[in-house]
Image (spheres, helix red, strand yellow):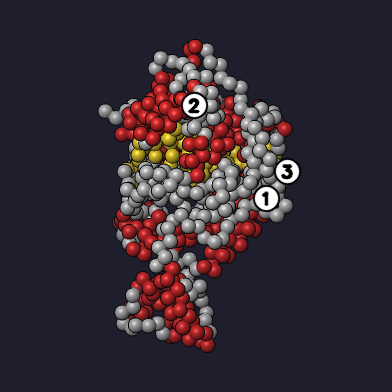
Amino acid sequence: MLDRRNFMKTCSGMGLAGTLFPGVLWAQAQAEGVKKITKEMIDNAAAIADVPIADDYKEMMLDSLNQHAKGYEEIYKLHIPNSVEPAVLFEPVLPGMKFETVRKPMRLSNAPNLASSAVPKNLEELAFASVRELAELVRTKKVSSIALTEMYLDRLKKYDPTLKFLVTLTEERARAQAKKADSEIAAGKYRGPLHGLPWGAKDLLATKGIRTTWGAGGFETQVIDEDATVVKRLDEAGAVLVAKLTLGALALGDVWFGGVTRNPWNTKQGSSGSSAGPASATAAGCVAFSIGSETLGSISSPSTRCGCTGLRPTFGFVPRTGAMALSWTMDKLGPICRTVEDCALVLDAIYGPDGHDRTVHSAAFNWDANLDWRKLRVGYLKSDFEHKPGEQQEAPKEEPAATPEEQKKREEQKKRREAGRARAEYDRKYNDAALAKLQEMGVKLIPVEMPKFPFDALITMLDAESAAAFDDLTRTGKDKLLTSQKDYDWPNTFRTSRFIPAVEYIQAARARKMAMEAVAKVFEGIDVIVAPTNGGQQLVITNLTGHPAVILPNGLRGSDAPKYPSEDVTDFQNAGGPGTLTSLTFLGNLYGEAKLLAFARAYQEATGFHLLHPKLEPSS
C-alpha cells in the first residue's frame, strides 16, 4: 500500500490540488490496493474536483510527482526551526507613500503633581497607576524600583490562582534588574520613563535562561538561548521583567496548557486572546505594562475583553526577532497598557530596525503629547456605526436534522448567534455615544467606507503560513498535544491548510496587493479613522494591510446588559454581560502612530473610561 503521508505530500505538490482532489485520489488508490497512482485515477479524481487535465499531460505529471516528493523529503531533513523566515517579504508601503524618518526627542505630557499624598503607605494603591505616573515617582526617587517590583510580584502571586495569567515568574532576574535601576537612578543615570518599571512579556518572546513555552502542550520546558529584540530593548530602557505571561496555545485564544486565562471583570469568562495573559495581568494591576502580539486580533480582542488600552503598531515597525512566528506577513508586536500615552512610551523603546528582522523600516516615531489633535482629519466608518445587528438577511432553509445530536448542535449555534446579536445591539449605544463625544470635542467627522472586497478569502495566507510554521506538528502527530482541539483550533487548521495549493497562496497575495491599494485610497487625506471594534471588517482589513490601531475602553455595560447563555469559560464567544467593558478602535496611516496616539489620547482623556478598574478577589 502507498504511504499516506508521502501520498498527500505529493498530491499537494502538484499545484492543481484543492482539498478534494488528493483525497479522491487517495481513496481510489486505497480501494484498488495498488502501489502507484494511475492516469485513470487522476482522470476520475479530476472530474470530481472539476480540474480538467488533458490525457497527454498525465504521464508527465506522474513523473514530476515522484521528483517533487524527493525534494520535499530533502527539505524536511533540514528540520527548519520556527525562527527561520521565508526568503520573501511582505511590504505594506505602496509606491509613492512617505513616512517620517528623522527621530526627534520625545515630548511627554506634563509631569503628574507629586504631592506628599501621591505616595501611599500601602504601595498596592499604585497598582493601577499609569506608566507616566509611576515613571515620575521612580525618577524623583519617591518610590524605588525594588519596592514596585516586590509589590507587583506579590500581586501576580495573589491573583494568578484566580486569573491564570502566569506562566513563569522571573523573580531572580527582576530583583537584579530593579536593584540595578535604583543604583543607576541614585547615581543620576536615568534612562527614561520605563526605567525601573515592572513589565510582563507574552510567553512567545524568547528570554535567555528562562523557558518560552508558546502556551502550548509539548513546549512546556522549551528554553530558547537568546533574548528577543524587544526584551533586549526594554532591558536597555531599564524596565524590569517580572513575568512571562500566558497566550492561547501557539497564539490562538486564551486556552493554554495550564488552563484558561480569565477576564478580571468577569472571571467566568476567558480573557480572550491570544495576548490573554498580558491583557489580564495589566487590567488586574499586576504589571505596569505588558507586551503582546497580534496576527489577527490578538491585541485588539483581549484589550477589549479586559478593558486595556492596546496598540497594534504598523507592520514592520517593531522587530519580531526572537518572537514565535505564526504568519511572517501578518505578525506584529505591541504594548498593552492602561493609557494611550503609556503605549506611546513603550513603543518609543521597542521600535526600529534591529538588523535581523528584514521587514522593519527606518521610520521614526516622534511622540508629542502636546500635538494639536484638533488639526487632524478624522474619518469614521459610517456604515459600520449605522449597521443594526437586528437587520439580518433571512436565513437559508436547512434540511431537517438527521440526528438528535445534530439538532442539538443547531440549537446551540442559534443561541450563540442570537446572543451575539443581542450584545451587538446593546453595545450600539456606546458607539453612538463615542461619535457624539467626538463631535462635542469639536471633531469634524468625515464619513468613509472600507472597500468591498473578499477580505476573508485572503486569510488563506495566514492559514498557509501558520501551517508551514508548525508543519512538523502536523506531520508527526504532535499536534494532539495542544490543549484545545475544536474545529477552529490550530490542529484542525494546520491539517486542512496542508491542502492549500501554492498557486492559490500566490493568488491570495496578489489579491492582497489590490486590497492594499483600495484601502490606501480610503486613507488619502485622512489621519485617523474611528471604528467600532466589533463592527464590520476593519480588524481583518487592517491586519492584512498592516495599518496600526489603538483599542481603548469605551464604557461599562450596565446591569441590564444581555448575558451570554453559557458560563463555559472555554467558549470563546462567552463575553459581555453586566459589569464588563466595551471598546472603541482608532485606525491610523502606515507609520502614523504619533498622530494616531495623540488623537486617541485626547478622546481617552475626555472620557476617562481607562480610570475604571475591576474589583478583584484572590482565590480562597
Label 2 residue SS: helix
Classify residue 315 as left or right of residue 162.
right
Q: Identify the residue under disc 2.
A: 184
Residue lying at 44% horizontally and 29% vertically, measured from the top left: 180
Q: Is residue 351 above or below residue 355?
A: above
Q: Nearer the viewer, residue 251 or 584?
A: 251
Q: Quadrant of residue 475?
A: bottom left
Picture coordinates of residue 21 (x, y %)? 44, 73
Q: Which of the two marks, 2 or 1, is nearer to us in this view?
A: 2
The answer to whether mark 2 and mark 1 are in CB contact below 8 A is no
Could you classify mark 3 by the number of other residues whose Cα lies within 10 Å: few (under 14), some (14-19), or many (20 or more)? Answer: few
Residue lying at 62% horizontally and 48% vertically, measured from the top left: 361
Pick out the residue farthest to the top. 116
| Residue at mark 3 to residue at mark 1: CA–CA distance | 10 Å
Q: Identify the residue under disc 3.
A: 525
- Three-letter amino acid code at disc 3? Gly
Looking at marks 3 and 1 on the same chain, the residue that comes earlier in the sequence is marked by: 1
| Residue at mark 2 to residue at mark 1: CA–CA distance | 46 Å
Q: Identify the residue under disc 1.
A: 520
Q: Nearer the viewer, residue 373 or 534?
A: 373
Picture coordinates of residue 365 (x, y %)? 63, 39
Picture coordinates of residue 405 (x, y %)? 31, 56
| Residue at mark 3 to residue at mark 2: CA–CA distance | 46 Å
- Three-letter amino acid code at disc 2? Glu
